[in-house]
């Protein structure tokens, strides 16, 4: 895989497996980087191989990712308490990126502040230290998965951006942010974000508005 943009590197995975169980067996930390709709199926495929002390990290977790993943694992009788399997999530993917062609990743930006939460809660504290050593100091532990879930702004950006540009999407390739987020689309995004903030306030969750999130995350 070749990365270009703000990060230029060429790497190859040390091992390629054709099943999830063979990929995760004996691993201390298992990073799950996929769309939220796949979390349940990934959990099902991992469940019979996971053991005490292993940490699952959903990056990103979406909204409620840890809850869905943990519920799927519990159906297989896994211990999710202290000393058992820990399920963690990051509120966002670390890198803003796209893939212009197979095997190539264009890195457009790196987030400077990414909240991490877990079940059980204490697992996030040790995990953040390991992640920061591996990726660079951008992770911080937060109080609960409600905070990471309600700090997720992916659906705030992407859903209205796609729905209000449906004609452009069907017509072909376009630049989602620079061309798709017009003034009127931005107003719809702001209205949706206001609803997210109202829900967060009702649950007593600490989070910030989208404009402040962009400043804190990307500087």
Image (spheres, helix red, strand yellow):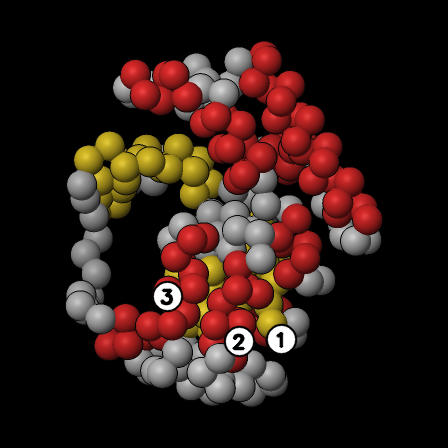
Residue 118 in picture, x, y percent from top left:
59, 68
Looking at the rendered structure, the secondary structure element under dot 2 is strand
Residue 77 in picture, x, y percent from top left:
49, 86
Taking the image as shown, residue 212 lies to the left or right of residue 181, namely right
Residue 50 in picture, x, y percent from top left:
39, 81
Q: Which mark is residue 42?
A: 3
Residue position for label 1: 120
Image quarter of the C terminus: top right
Q: Measure the alpha-carbon separation of dots 3 and 2.
A: 15 Å
> Which residue is at the front of the view, 199 or 2?
199
Whichever of callouts 1 and 3 sits on the residue coming sooner in the sequence is 3
Q: Residue at x 58, y 40 (%)?
A: 153
| Viewer-nearest of discs 3 and 2 | 3
The number of discs equals 3
Q: Which residue is drawn at 27% across and 37% down?
A: 99
Q: Residue 152 carries which label?
A: none
Q: Quadrant of residue 29?
A: bottom left
Residue position for label 2: 86
Q: Which residue is drawn at 64% across and 61% down?
A: 145
């Amino acid at each position: 895989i070749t990365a270009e943009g703000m990060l230029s590197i060429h790497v190859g995975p040390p091992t390629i497996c054709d099943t999830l169980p063979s990929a995760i067996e004996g691993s201390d930390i298992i990073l799950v980087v996929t769309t939220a709709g796949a979390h349940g199926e990934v959990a099902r495929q991992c469940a019979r191989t996971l053991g005490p002390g292993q940490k699952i990290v959903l990056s990103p977790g979406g909204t409620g990712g840890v809850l869905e993943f943990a519920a799927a694992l519990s159906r297989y009788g896994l211990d999710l308490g202290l000393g058992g399997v820990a399920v963690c999530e990051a509120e966002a993917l670390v890198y803003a990126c796209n893939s212009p062609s197979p095997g190539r990743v264009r890195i457009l930006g790196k987030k400077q502040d990414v909240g991490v939460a877990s079940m059980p809660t204490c697992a996030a504290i040790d995990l953040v230290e390991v992640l920061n050593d591996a990726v660079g100091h951008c992770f911080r532990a937060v109080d609960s998965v409600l905070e990471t879930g309600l700090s997720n702004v992916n659906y705030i950006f992407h859903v209205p951006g796609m729905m209000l540009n449906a004609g452009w999407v069907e017509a072909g390739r376009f630049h989602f942010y620079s061309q798709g987020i017009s003034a009127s689309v931005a107003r719809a995004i702001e209205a949706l974000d206001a609803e997210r903030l109202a829900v967060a306030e009702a649950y007593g969750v600490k989070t910030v508005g989208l404009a402040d999130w962009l400043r804190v995350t990307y500087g």
